[in-house]
């Protein structure tokens, strides 16, 4: 079972009241999830008619969390207890059957906080 030591994750480059005592290096995590044909179709209808696409929002949240979890695990393996300067990138990839895949990448700097 993977170590579940808490890792603080932030988009800022410092953490108020905490001092960075070691920089461990760049860490990252990626997630690629499929959104099936029916969700794509109904999301398209919602886009035309207006409103939110709950199916895509759910897939997006799941992909984001998986990418962050992968990044945190890599930081733990390096001996870090935080990741600062986190950046999230999102892309959709069109596939041949007309569907799409959602790719989320998370990256940051693994550090040790006092």
Image (cartoon, helix red, strand yellow):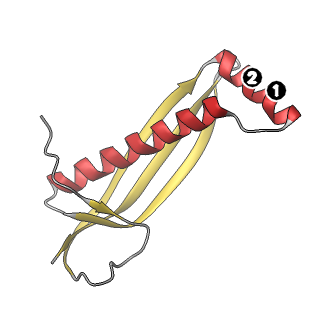
- Which disc, if any, is residue 45? 1
- Which disc, if any, is residue 42? 2
| x and y percentages locating residue 42 in the rendered image | 74, 22
Q: At 41% from the left edge and 43% from the top edge, which residue is drawn?
A: 65
Lateral position of residue 6 relative to residue 32, left or right: left
Quarter of the figure that contains the C terminus: bottom left
| x and y percentages locating residue 16 in the rendered image | 33, 82
Q: Secondary structure at mark 2?
A: helix
Image quadrant assignment for residue 56: top right
- Which disc, if any, is residue 105? none
Lateral position of residue 6 relative to residue 66, left or right: left
Q: Secondary structure at mark 1?
A: helix
Image quadrant assignment for residue 94: top right
| x and y percentages locating residue 20 in the rendered image | 22, 79
Q: CA distance from mark 1 to mark 2?
A: 5 Å
Lateral position of residue 11 relative to residue 9, left or right: right
Above or below residue 71? Residue 10 is below
Q: At 35% from the left edge and 79% from the top edge, which residue is drawn?
A: 14
């Amino acid at each position: 079972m993977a170590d579940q030591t808490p890792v603080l994750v932030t988009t800022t480059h410092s953490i108020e009241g905490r001092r960075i005592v070691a920089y461990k290096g760049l860490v990252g995590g990626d997630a690629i999830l499929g959104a099936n044909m029916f969700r794509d179709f109904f999301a398209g209808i919602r886009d035309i008619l207006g409103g939110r696409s709950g199916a895509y929002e759910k897939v997006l949240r799941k992909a984001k969390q998986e990418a962050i979890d992968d990044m945190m695990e890599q930081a733990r393996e390096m001996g870090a207890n935080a990741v600062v300067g986190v950046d999230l990138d999102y892309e959709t990839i069109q596939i041949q059957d007309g569907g799409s895949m959602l790719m989320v990448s998370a990256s940051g700097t693994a550090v040790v906080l006092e």
